């Protein structure tokens, strides 16, 4: 108990509410009287021209208040974070299956759903493109391609002892937050509106609602208590539903709610981008990488959304954790007829890192080496330069690698796997090492700012509002720890308020792993505005100079010895002395900036490092496998809250394992997701999670760029999951599978087919031999 009271200890502040089912989400709050329900009507085809739509039966169905289409939008009809290319409700052309064409608004959800089934639509089909290479060949580019480059790649090949080439096909990923997308709107006096939205980006929702209603932003209040998961899926695509309920509320003059079903959410919203990639890697005789070239074709979906910044992060992470003197990477957003793909934990980094790791695997095959032999000699060190120009400061890449190899005894793991494989035919083990180096900061430099508002009430309790969103990741626990540390009081006195656009303006999305960094610093700065007044009051009350005063464990100290004066009395007297007990704080990440056009400069405040060893056993008869162990050494700087950080590391890792293995996002040539429900889209569960999941946090070192010396933790661990692909591939190769294609996810089906192909290829030889 006393341990829990200390800053930086204890569980997620919402843990108890969550497990008891008492946490409030958008639709848990008692609805305003007369609230209506809206349901979206989505396009049945992925591409086509709308010939006619008959809404008569729907409009006269029981309980229906209105059915809205594009013509009913009062002002701006287009939305989009980067470029406004997406119709809020479809115009005459539909561009993906599920694109919202109309909104049915009714007294109840059941009535709205019934009325929706009465809509008749006539669409002339147009050709459908689902693959990025196909889109590229057809010239369907969302933006011009981009290339980042260092050294002289064309010259470098000549010096290489080994050159390999290959391709990757990388699957997408559905976010599957427990809480699907949803929003509620309430019209207020004088044309104002309040929107409750499950969004990672309240300001994006506020901006879009203001445009769509044709009113100034100050008339739109967006409030977000918490999310039941976001993972990037609500960074940009929560905006649509906020706009829908706002339009319906404006039209009807009543509160309106929209809650997507799981099937609607999967069908109508974008996912992690699938990529198709080509690579070429050149190495010297010792495995040192001399040259790397790659082309990344991103499956962007139908509209721009965040595809370009995602692509940019792919470019920035294309060399992962390796020092490569000559590199050229081209990347391009390819327009297809899928739902617009979007942010997802890692934000384009994972796909590019998978390509790099595939190239190393191919080289290892050719050179008769293990992958980790090549990885190890190429790891980044302090003073190296990324191929986009940023120099590595305080690089801890090798430290995490060495620590993982030694602490988890990689040599022993290897020899056990080899012994096992020598004495088993049906089952084979594979082992991989996956180093991760991930850059922290929004690549759009202007987004690297955060604000907070801190109130101390006269009873000594504190309310903190930030621009950050609590989406289960534990950022509010971190905010509490920061304020508790500055004031020297118990975290129990501090409450984190709902995020609200009237308390914090212009906030960046909670994304890029930067939420605790940006908002934590802002909380610290706000508290530091209030603290001097408290110390002055104490100085007056105790009649000692301010310089001798501090606060610790809720008590004022004089020269580090406890006085009689406690927090609550101090606050009350500060109020009577008419000193401020409220302040806002503003933080902007210092010392970053880069030229995105040239792909050169310092986009990131710092990097997060880690290494994961993965062990698998493949059943070569059935194609199924188990992940036996994941053993991680991870750099969190000086953790604010170890439990919260471990939660992020384990959760990210398992989400990465799912992406690489079982989360198979299947769509057909008509652009329809055939794995569009949780019965056909398999998520990793607790049974799939490795029994032996160990996380060793690297010896703490203060990170000057993070609050309380911490490092961001949200996204980097996802990329440990990439290792499982190469562990499974290695096990398959132990069974004779040879050149296993770099095609993710590596589902049991693909494992089995890969092994079958190898068996078939071998048959003629064995026939000849007999
Ligand atoms: N979102 C964004 C992100 O807008 N910019 C980024 O750089 C980013 N990085 C990771 C995740 N989300
Ligand atoms: Mo994100 S991919 O919303 O950090």
Image (cartoon, helix red, strand yellow):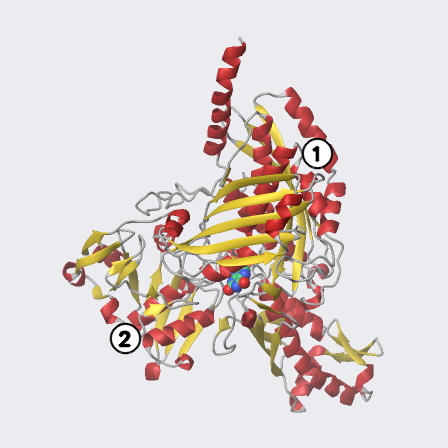
Let me know if residue 695 appears in the view.
yes
Residue located at (66% from left, 53% from top): 325
Q: Quadrant of residue 554?
A: bottom right
State the residue in front, 187 or 451: 451
Question: Which residue position holds label 2?
Answer: 74
Q: Quadrant of residue 540?
A: bottom right
Residue 372, given in percent of the width and then of the height, sits at 68, 40
560 versus 99 height, above or below: below
Q: Do tag 1 and tag 2 residues touch (Cβ < 8 Å)?
A: no
744 versus 701 height, above or below: above
Q: CA distance from mark 1 to mark 2?
A: 64 Å
Residue 253, given in percent of the width and then of the height, sits at 28, 75
Residue density around tag 2, few if under 14, some if 14–19, many if 20 or more, within 10 Å: some
Q: Element under label 1?
A: helix
Q: Quadrant of residue 522?
A: bottom right
Residue 236, given in percent of the width and then of the height, sits at 44, 63
Q: Element under label 2?
A: loop
State the residue in front, 755 or 27: 755
Residue density around tag 1, few if under 14, some if 14–19, many if 20 or more, within 10 Å: some
Residue located at (63% from left, 61% from top): 712
State the residue in front, 150 or 746: 150
Question: Which residue position holds label 1?
Answer: 413
Position of 247 compared to 482: left or right?
left
Residue located at (46% from left, 58% from top): 145
């Amino acid at each position: 108990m006393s341990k829990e009271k200390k800053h930086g200890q204890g569980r997620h502040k919402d843990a108890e509410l969550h497990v008891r089912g008492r946490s409030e989400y958008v639709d848990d709050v008692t609805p305003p009287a007369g609230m209506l329900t809206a349901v979206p009507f989505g396009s049945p085809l992925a591409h086509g021209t709308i010939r006619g739509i008959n809404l008569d039966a729907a409009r006269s169905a029981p309980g229906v208040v209105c059915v809205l289409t594009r013509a009913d939008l009062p002002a701006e009809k287009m939305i989009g974070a980067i470029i406004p290319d997406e119709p809020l409700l479809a115009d005459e052309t539909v561009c993906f299956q599920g694109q919202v064409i109309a909104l049915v608004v009714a007294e109840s959800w059941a009535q709205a759903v019934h009325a929706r089934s009465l809509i008749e639509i006539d669409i002339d089909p147009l050709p459908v493109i689902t693959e990025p290479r196909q889109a590229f060949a057809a010239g369907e580019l969302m933006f011009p391609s981009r290339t980042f480059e260092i050294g002289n790649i064309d010259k470098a090949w000549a010096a290489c002892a080994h050159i390999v080439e290959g391709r990757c096909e990388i699957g997408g990923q559905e976010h599957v937050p427990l809480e699907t997308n949803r929003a509620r709107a309430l019209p207020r006096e004088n044309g104002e509106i309040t929107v409750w939205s499950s969004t990672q980006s309240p300001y994006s929702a506020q901006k879009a609602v203001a445009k769509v209603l044709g009113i100034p932003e100050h008339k739109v209040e967006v409030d977000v208590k918490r999310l039941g998961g976001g993972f990037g899926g609500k960074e940009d695509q929560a905006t649509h539903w906020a706009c829908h309920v706002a339009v319906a509320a404006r039209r009807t003059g009543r509160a309106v709610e929209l809650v997507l079903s799981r099937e609607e959410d999967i069908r109508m919203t974008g996912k992690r981008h699938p990529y198709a990639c080509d690579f070429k890697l050149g190495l010297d005789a010792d495995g040192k990488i001399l040259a790397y070239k790659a082309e990344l074709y991103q499956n962007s979906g139908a509209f721009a959304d965040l595809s370009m910044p995602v692509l940019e992060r792919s470019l920035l992470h294309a060399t992962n954790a390796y020092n490569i003197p000559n590199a050229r990477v081209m990347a391009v957003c390819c327009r297809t007829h899928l739902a617009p793909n979007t942010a997802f934990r890692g934000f384009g980094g994972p796909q590019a890192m998978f390509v790099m790791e595939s190239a190393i695997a191919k080289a290892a095959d050719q050179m008769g080496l293990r992958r980790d032999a090549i990885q190890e000699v190429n790891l980044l060190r302090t003073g190296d330069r990324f191929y986009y120009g940023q120099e590595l400061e305080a690089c801890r890449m090798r430290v995490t690698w060495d620590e993982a190899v030694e602490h988890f005894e990689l040599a022993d793991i290897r020899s056990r796997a080899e012994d096992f494989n020598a004495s088993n035919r049906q089952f084979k083990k594979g082992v991989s090492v996956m180093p991760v180096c991930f850059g922290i900061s929004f690549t759009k430099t202007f987004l690297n700012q955060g604000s907070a508002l801190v109130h101390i009430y006269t009873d000594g309790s504190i309310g903190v509002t930030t621009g950050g969103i609590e989406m289960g990741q534990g950022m509010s626990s971190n905010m509490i720890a920061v304020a508790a540390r500055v004031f020297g009081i118990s975290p129990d006195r501090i409450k984190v308020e709902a995020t609200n656009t009237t308390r914090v303006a212009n906030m960046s999305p909670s994304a890029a792993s930067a939420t605790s960094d940006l908002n934590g610093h802002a909380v610290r700065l706000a508290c530091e505005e209030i603290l001097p007044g408290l110390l002055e009051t104490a100085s007056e009350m105790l009649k000692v100079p301010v310089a001798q005063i501090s606060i610790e464990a809720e008590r004022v100290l004089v020269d580090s010895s406890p006085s009689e004066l406690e927090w609550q009395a101090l606050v009350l007297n500060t109020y009577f002395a008419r000193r401020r007990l409220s302040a806002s704080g503003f933080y902007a990440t210092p010392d970053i900036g880069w030229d995105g056009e040239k792909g050169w400069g310092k986009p990131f405040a710092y990097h997060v490092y880690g290494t994961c060893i993965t062990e698998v056993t493949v059943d070569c008869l059935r194609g199924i496998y188990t992940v036996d162990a994941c053993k991680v050494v991870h750099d969190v700087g000086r953790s604010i809250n170890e439990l919260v950080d471990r939660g992020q590391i384990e959760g990210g890792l398992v989400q990465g394992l799912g992406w690489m293995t079982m989360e198979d996002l299947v769509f057909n040539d008509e652009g329809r997701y055939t794995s569009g429900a949780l019965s056909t889209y398999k998520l990793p569960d607790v049974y799939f999670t490795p029994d032996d999941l160990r996380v060793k946090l690297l010896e703490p070192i203060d990170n000057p760029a993070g609050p309380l010396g911490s490092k961001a933790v949200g996204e980097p661990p996802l990329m440990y999951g990439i290792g499982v692909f190469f562990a499974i591939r290695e096990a398959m190769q132990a069974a004779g599978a040879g050149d296993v294609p770099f095609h993710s996810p590596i589902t049991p089906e693909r494992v089995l087919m890969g092994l079958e192909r190898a068996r078939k290829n071998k048959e003629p030889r064995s026939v000849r031999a007999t």
